[in-house]
Image (tube, rainbow, N blue to C red):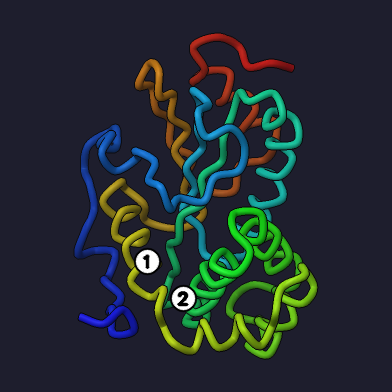
Amino acid sequence: MPAQNAQPVAREQVGADSTDASVDLLALTPDDHILGNPNANVVIIEWSDPECPFCKRFHDTMNQIMAQYGKSGDVAWVYRHSPIDQLHPKARKEAEALECANEQGGNDAFWKYTTKLFEVTPGNNGLDPAMIPQIAQMVGLDGAKLSACVATGKYAARVQRDFVNGANAGVKGTPYSIVWNRKTGKQMPLNGAYPFENVKSILGLVAATPVTK
């Protein structure tokens, strides 16, 4: 099936009932979007929707977390797509735009575009589609090239893969994150936009040893 024909799957059609997500679902892949040390013992895997106002808030929190823990290599942040089509029909194409930013400028461009999109969008499906190429220009990318990439739908299947992965890992809404210690196997889910101090405390609980301060 061509990528542009990938169809959304309702959340109720997939999902896991177990307390911990399968390691196979959490395992990092070569095309995952990772901020920080990809070999960090502790990773925060977030499933996010670019039009979700709570994701917008949590993105700021995660940037704070990475500013404190990312440089030391203690923690990595993994971003995966989980657009809520029923509430935010624009979100899926915006998620594809993030992938197109990655295609054009690599991992660094992906994160810059994602952060700028969250800064610009009012949330709740409020972003003017005309802003998609403008955001690209704001972060030093070719806006026309990014728009052309989005129009092809070439990353629709990539976004859908993340969506299904999240649903099977227990995602019911966004933001939904799993703090996972890859060394010990310990997991802790974060269902919602936890503030900085809460995420910091959870990191301490999940880490095999206290994270560097």
Q: Is 166 rendered above or below residue 197?
A: below
**Identity of the residue drawn at 31% across and 47% down:** 170
Lateral position of residue 132 relative to residue 188, left or right: right
Q: Nearer the viewer, mark 1 or mark 2?
A: 1
**Residue for badge 1:** 158
Lateral position of residue 18 relative to residue 91, left or right: left
Please give the label number shown on residue 109: none
**Identity of the residue drawn at 43% across and 70% down:** 84
SS state under label 2: helix
Lateral position of residue 29 relative to residue 25, left or right: right
| Sequence-first tag of 1 and 2 | 2
Q: At which x and y percent is residue 36?
A: 62, 37
Quadrant of the image occupied by residue 103: bottom right
Mark 1 → mark 2, Cα distance in angstroms: 11 Å
**Residue for badge 2:** 92
Q: Is 189 rendered above or below residue 118?
A: above
Q: At which x and y percent is residue 142?
A: 70, 79
**Identity of the residue drawn at 53% across and 26% down:** 40
Q: Is 134 rendered above or below residue 184?
A: below
Of 10 and 80, which appears nearest the observer? 80
Q: At which x and y percent is residue 80?
A: 46, 55
Crowding at dot 1, Cα within 10 Å, few <14 / some 14-19 / many 20+, comes out as some
**Identity of the residue drawn at 40% across and 24% down:** 182
Quadrant of the image occupied by residue 135: bottom right
Q: Amino acid at mark 2?
A: Arg
Q: Is 97 rendered above or below residue 72?
A: below
Q: Amino acid at mark 1?
A: Arg
Marks 1/2 in contact by CB < 8 Å: the verdict is: no
Quadrant of the image occupied by residue 200: top right
Of 7 and 123, which appears nearest the observer? 7
